[in-house]
């Protein structure tokens, strides 16, 4: 797979925490090589305050981050297909996802939902930090793959392995 810039979509049901974190991390880590997107099947309509707080504390740009439905990308998909789709929550992995023209490479990178953690502010903070740490490790491994040297099947296998990190 060789391309100058790959489009990557992170999917989660609510698109308020995990997929937003992944979008921001990939954008910062390799924004020149990847266009980072996120969406949900039933978006919450706002980014979780815990995600925004964590990102801002680490000097991420958050002004452009927003919760959106995956249908938002369907109008432009023929002209600008998605190359990779990662589900980051178990709900999204089990849902019927739209058919993405261009047959993107897909993988499931499930991460526990930090937005679902009930408890003290400290416990919630730990959950957001843990989610970001897991996503960061997976995204770092992803951006360092030799894309031009891997065929679709080998790439899919490597992405599933990365999902175990």
Image: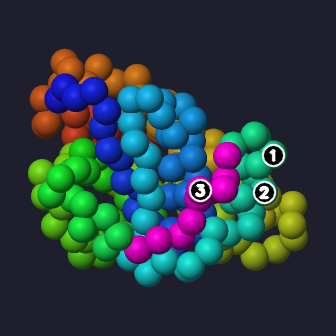
Q: Do the residues labelled 3 and 2 touch (CB within 8 Å)?
A: no
What separation in Å lies between label 3 and label 2 (alpha carbons)?
A: 14 Å
Main secondary structure along the magenta-highlighted residues: loop
Residue 165 or residue 24, whichever sits in front? 24
Drawn side of residue 45 relative to residue 77, left or right:
right
Which one is closest to the eye, mark 3 or mark 2? 3
SS of the residue at dot 2? helix
> Which label's residue is closer to the chain start, 3 or 2?
2
Q: x and y percent of residue 50 in the render?
A: 74, 63
Q: x and y percent of residue 154 in the render?
A: 17, 31
What separation in Å lies between label 3 and label 1 (alpha carbons)?
A: 16 Å
> Which label's residue is closer to the chain start, 3 or 1?
1
Q: Give, as a single range, the part of the protein colored magenta.
A: 61-69
Residue 16 or residue 162, whichever sits in front? 16
Q: Mark 2 packing: few (<14 Cα in 10 Å), some, or many (20+)? A: some
Dot 3 corresponds to which residue? 64
Q: Does the magenta run of residues contain 158?
A: no
User: On residue 53, which mark appears?
Assistant: 2
What separation in Å lies between label 1 and label 2 (alpha carbons)?
A: 6 Å
SS of the residue at dot 1? helix
Q: Do the residues labelled 1 and 2 touch (CB within 8 Å)?
A: yes
């Amino acid at each position: 797979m060789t391309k100058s810039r790959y489009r990557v979509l992170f999917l989660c049901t609510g698109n308020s925490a995990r997929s937003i974190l992944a979008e921001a991390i990939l954008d910062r880590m390799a924004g020149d090589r990847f266009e980072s997107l996120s969406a949900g099947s039933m978006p919450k309509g706002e980014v979780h305050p815990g995600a925004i707080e964590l990102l801002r504390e680490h000097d991420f740009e958050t002004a452009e981050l927003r919760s959106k439905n995956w249908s938002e990308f369907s109008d432009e998909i023929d002209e600008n297909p998605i190359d990779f789709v990662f589900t980051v929550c178990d709900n999204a992995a089990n849902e019927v996802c739209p058919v993405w023209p261009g047959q993107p490479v897909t993988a499931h990178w499930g991460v526990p939902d930090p937005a679902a953690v009930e408890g003290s502010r400290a416990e919630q903070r730990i959950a957001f930090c843990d989610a970001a740490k897991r996503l960061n490790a997976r995204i770092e491994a992803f951006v360092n793959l030799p894309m031009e040297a891997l065929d679709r099947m080998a790439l899919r296998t490597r992405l599933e392995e990365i999902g175990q990190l």
